Image (cartoon, rainbow, N blue to C red):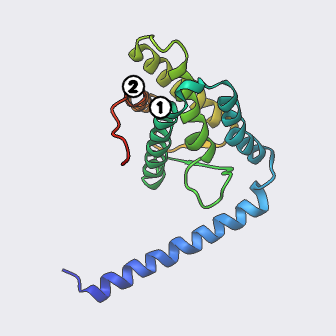
Amino acid sequence: MKDNKQVRRLIDENYDQIHKLIQEKIEIWFDYVVFSSLWWLGVALSVIPWILWFIFRNKNSTDRILYSGFFVIIISIALDIVGDQFSLWHYRFNVIPIVPTYFPWDITLMPVTVMFILQIKPDTNPFIKAIVFAVFSAYIAEPFFHWLGIYVTLSWKYTYSVPIQFVIYLVAHYLSRRSHFSKFY
């Protein structure tokens, strides 16, 4: 077993290397990404879907739909970070340089799409909606972002996303149907 001083030194050296790479990433972002056409697309995709959702949402179900949307945001960010850290994929043209995930995808496109689907024909079988969402996300949205040069798959296939997106939608659907919350006293 290594002594604590050696472990601390290794961790500190690793941190220093990561810090230098993050600084380099920020410099690249400032020099080449910010205000580029793909950066502006990312900004638009971060804002416009939320505006559309706000306008067209089912106002009687706003809280329950947002509850599901926040779940999708949390899971999307967590899975995106894991995929990035394990070099399964990475993103170029980030809206925010220090975030390893693609902000518009995790914070806007995934949750807003799920929230709209939850509202449309709410009595439709959730498994059908889940498969449509999963297939659309994996075989249309991901390849589109790959084609734009934003999303880079390293050891990931679009097909791997299908069951994950399927489960994310089903859990969001389940959460949107919850009604047993206790009152605050």
Report the residue marked by disc 1.
64
Displayed quadrant of residue 179:
top left
Q: Residue at x 70, y 28 (%)?
A: 55
For this orientation, the residue located farthest to the front is: 185
Report the residue marked by disc 2.
177
Three-letter amino acid code at the position of disc 1? Arg
Q: Residue at x 69, y 50 (%)?
A: 93
**How many residues crowd mark 1 within 10 Å: few (<14), some (14–19), many (20+)?**
some
Displayed quadrant of residue 20:
bottom right
Which of 85 and 73 lies nearest the eye of the viewer?
73
Could you give the CA–CA distance between mark 2 and mark 1, rounded to whole angstroms? 8 Å
Work out whether 88 lies above or below 1: above
Q: Residue at x 31, y 81 (%)?
A: 7
Asked whether, in this view, residue 141 is left or right of residue 185, the answer is right
Q: How many marks?
A: 2
Q: Residue at x 41, y 17 (%)?
A: 126
For this orientation, the residue located farthest to the bottom is: 5
